[in-house]
Amino acid sequence: MQIEKKQVIDFYAGSISGEEALYFLEERDVDFIFYGPRERTMGSIDPQNEFGLVFEEKDTLIFAVDKGHK
């Protein structure tokens, strides 16, 4: 499995620490997190605890990454 793909899966699975997750997002200059049905199947993160909800439709959520964490 490609390293980047594994890191994305680990992020959504919640198998990395909060600090590692923020570093992962910072290194990739991520502005938004897409959280839909497929992402929910990957694991147990709860982006609502860390990120601001900016879009919601049915079972799809988009969160803004707070650049203040950087």
Image (cartoon, grey):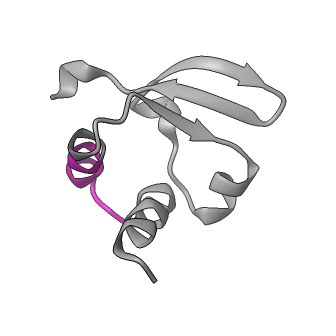
Q: Quadrant of residue 61?
A: top right
Number of numbered discs:
0
Single out the residue that lies furthest toward the right. 58
Q: Does 44 sit left or right of 49 as displayed?
A: right
Which residue is located at x 59 percent, y 28 percent? 62
Which residue is located at x 39 percent, y 28 percent? 31
- 35 vs 70: above or below: below
Which stretch did the figure color magenta? 15-24
- 51 vs 23: above or below: above
Q: Position of residue 42 (x, y in %)?
A: 60, 64
Asked if residue 16 is among those painted magenta in the image, a careful observer would answer: yes
Q: Position of residue 47 (x, y in %)?
A: 49, 37
Q: Quadrant of residue 14?
A: bottom left
Q: Position of residue 28 (x, y in %)?
A: 28, 44
- 23 vs 17: above or below: above
Q: Does 68 sit left or right of 37 as displayed?
A: left
In front: 55, or 43? Answer: 55
User: What kind of secondary structure does the magenta stretch mostly adopt?
Assistant: helix
